Amino acid sequence: MVFAFFKKEDPGLGHIASRAVGMLHDARHSFDLATLALLDGASFSSVEEDVRATDARINQTEQDLRAELVVHVSVQGANDIGVVMGYTLLIKKIERIGDQAKNILDLAEEVGTIVDDEGGHQLMDERRRVSTMFADAASLLAEPNDEASVNAFIDDAGQVSADYQTKINDLMHSDLPGSVVVPRAIYYRYLKRIVANLRGVVSVVSEPLPNIDYLDDGATDITDD
Amino acid sequence: MGSVDDRGVSSIPAPARAALVIGLIYIFLVGVSSLETGIKTMGSDTTESLFSAVSNPIAGLCVGILGTVLVQSSSASTSVIVGLVASQKLGVDDAVPMIMGANIGTTVTNSLVSLGHVRHSNEFRRAFAAATVHDFFNILAVGLLLPLELIFGIVSGTAENISERLVGSAGSEWKSPIKAWVKGPVGWIKDGLSTLGAEANLLGTLMVAVGLVVILAALTFITKNMRALVADRVERSLNAILGKGGGAVAMVLGMLITIAVQSSSITTSILIPLAGAGVIRLQNAYPVTLGANVGTTITALLAALAGSSPEALTVGLAHTTFNVLGIVLLYVLPFARSLPILGAEKLAEIATTRRTMAVVYVFIMFIVLPLIGVTLLR
């Protein structure tokens, strides 16, 4: 460990971005497993340990990176303060995505699988769609200079969130029994939050710091309840 | 978010900055040599009256504290002490308590940095404890080692032993290559001042003044440039300490960082906001400060190379010996290890309850008590 002083590495905060991408891959892993339990009949017990361990790893990484960001400011001064605050927001968003994946697992524990219910295929399609968005967000985080792709992702995520809100609204006024409607509405709510946080992750890369989490009309998009 | 590469911290390329640092070290050595020559140029009556004040070890200790508080750098004050010893006008026995005082005085910077957190109770408690753990270690080390030094000469004896093996016995003259390299510029300073009409005591005083200014300026720029040069390494080292905890490794990293930046105040001051934010625990910050204590002694050793007397090297080595022995007594021995931490935590608790106590502590510890010591015991 003493060799940390002599080791030659790229200067700056590049390693924070790499580890944030790692966190995003972990969050996707949790999401995939939790949704398998909820939608595809995988047994809760077979995925629980993995999801919770992955969530704990994400949380620990967030804490470690926060500490490293404070060290960076203490050593390097305030030159990178905007970048440091951006990374602080970014890793918090990824940590929240991990929490949402855990919430989906908790939902699976409560209601079992909902794949055989009406609309089950659509739920699986949405799962695939969101899972792909994890990969896209990770790519953009690793290579943030492709402005067109970043903007396309942000627009797409905004549209997906709006679609999920429409689905939630439809379910609220549905005549289906509560045991069918409620798990779906909650699931879509979690998907919406995950997509909003993925949008936030990519926005951190491109938007000015004061604007992150604020929509064009000035409303905030930070509620994770 | 922008790339980190855009930050523009280092407008000077690293190789050029490294070359600049080497040049600054040379200027620093010229400053030390100028100081030594200035003292030698003064009449013996003048130097006797100057240094009689520190013949009492407690007064010497207090002078060391005050001098270091004044320049906010133990590297600078110990280099000056080494320069004085090199001039043969200040003895090793008188210099060692001053060196110990410099060790205490340098911690004022941490305490001042920690006062910046005073508005937030929890943050301040952690920051102040991290600052004062260094004070407690140094005070306890002086409390234990100064009496042992006065009775048995434990610090100076050990240092003298090493010095003798390296360059020969006291009273002799060793051929320092650095001394020869800096001889030219020192001669130019002396000739320049003589041309202006200065001679004897005035010439000596002016050479001392030039030496002091050069030492302080050179050290300031060395520290500034080295900090820019090794900032990424410092950051990586601190991250390693956060990841793996404290102990001997943290101590070695604290020493390496301090050797690199030539300032224990820089190393320890970086720790204060980290401790305040709760990123580093007091138990982990503590060994880093001890490593910094050892690392900072490299400057006095460097300064000794500008002189040709073994005594100057002995004093430089005494600084290292004092800090290493302090670690052996207060860190290696398990029962003593927690004493500075407990003291710092208790003091931080009091200071958090009554914030003015923190300011009073700094004022009394670093200004009032040393002043009283110098006034009464000189």
Image (cartoon, helix red, strand yellow):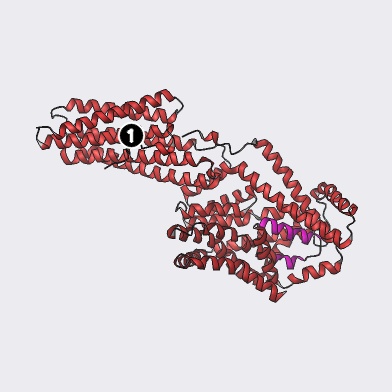
The disc numbered 1 marks a residue on which chain?
Answer: A
Say which residue appears at 46% left-offset and 59% top-offset: B119
Q: Quadrant of residue A87?
A: top left
Q: Where residue A161 appears, x then y in whole percent? A: 28, 31
Secondary structure beneath label 1: loop
- Residue B79 falls inside the magenta stretch: yes
A110 or B51, nearer to the observer: B51
- Residue B171, image x, y percentages: 83, 62
Q: Residue at x 69, y 53 (%)?
A: B299
Q: Is residue A176 left or right of residue B95?
A: left
**Residue beneath the point at 74% across and 68% down:** B94
The residue beneath circle 1 is: A217
Q: Please name the amino acid that badge 1 sits on.
A: Asp
- Indicate whether residue A101 is drawn in magenta: no
> Horizontal placement of B37 versus A94: left or right?
right
Number of marks in picture: 1
Residue A113 in the image: above or below residue B374: above
- Does B297 appear above or below B97? above
Q: Which residues are magenta?
A: B74-96
